[in-house]
Image (cartoon, grey):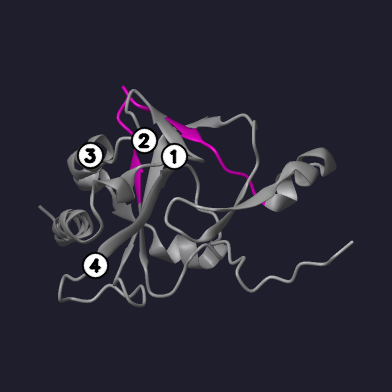
Amino acid sequence: MSIDTLNLAIALCNTLAAKGSGHFARPAGSSLTGIDTNNGEAVYAFLLGLVGAFEEVTDAAKASGAAWGGCRYFRAKLPEAVVGMEGIALLSELDDADLARVRIVKGHHGGLELQLPGAAKRETNIAHMIVGDPTDGRWPPGHDAVVFTWYPGRLTPPVVIGGATVKFV
C-alpha cells in the first residue's frame, strides 16, 4: 500500500468522523451510474474501495488554475461497471440561452454555487478527489486531512461567488 493510498483512506475516515456520510453525497452536478450518489454511505464505501486507483495530479490542477490553497488533487479511472456523469460546464462553454438560465443557490455544503437546471450531463470514466487540512487546505504529515470534495469528471477551477458584485438592472 502506497503512502498516498494510506493517506487517502485516512482522509476519508477523518471526513466521515468529522462531517458524517452525508458529506460524500452529490445531490447536484456530477454523478455515477450504478451507485446512488445521494446516499453518502454508498459513496463513502465506493471511494474507500477506489483509493488504490487514485494518482496525484496536483501539479496538473495548479497548471490549469483548478487548484485551491494547499490541497492535493487525485484522479482515478472508474471501474468498468461504473459510468461517471459529468454535470458541470465552464461559463465560457455556455451559449447565451444557457447563461440566462444559470442560477445562484446555496449548495450542498452551505456555500454559494452556480447551477444550470435541465442541462445534459456527459459521460466520463474518471473521478477526482480534493484532499487537504480542514482549516487551510494544506496536507499536513499529521494526518488531519479531510476530503473537501470528490466528483466524476475533469478538473475545473473553484468558484468564488461570495465576493462577486451583483449589478442591478
Magenta-colored span: 75-90
Give whichever of 23, 155 is nearer the camera: 23
Mark 2 or 1 closer to N-term? 1
Mark 3 or 4 closer to N-term? 3
At 39% across and 58% down in the image, what residue appears? 57
Give whichever of 147, 57 is nearer the camera: 147
Give whichever of 109, 93 is nearer the camera: 109
Distance between mark 2 and mark 1 Cα atoms: 5 Å
Hey, what amino acid is under mark 1? Pro
At 18% across and 76% down in the image, what residue appears? 141
Residue identified by numbered label 3: 41
Residue 80 quadrant: top left
Question: Can you tell which mark lies on residue 27?
Answer: 1
SS state under label 3 = helix
Hey, what amino acid is under mark 2? Asn
Hey, what amino acid is under mark 4? Ala
| Crowd rating for badge 2 (residues with CA inside 10 Å; few <14, some 14–19, many 20+) | some
Distance between mark 2 and mark 4 Cα atoms: 23 Å
Residue 28 place in picture, x, y as percent:
49, 40
Distance between mark 3 and mark 4 Cα atoms: 19 Å
Residue identified by numbered label 2: 38
Query: Which tag is nearer the camera, tag 2 or tag 4?
Result: 2
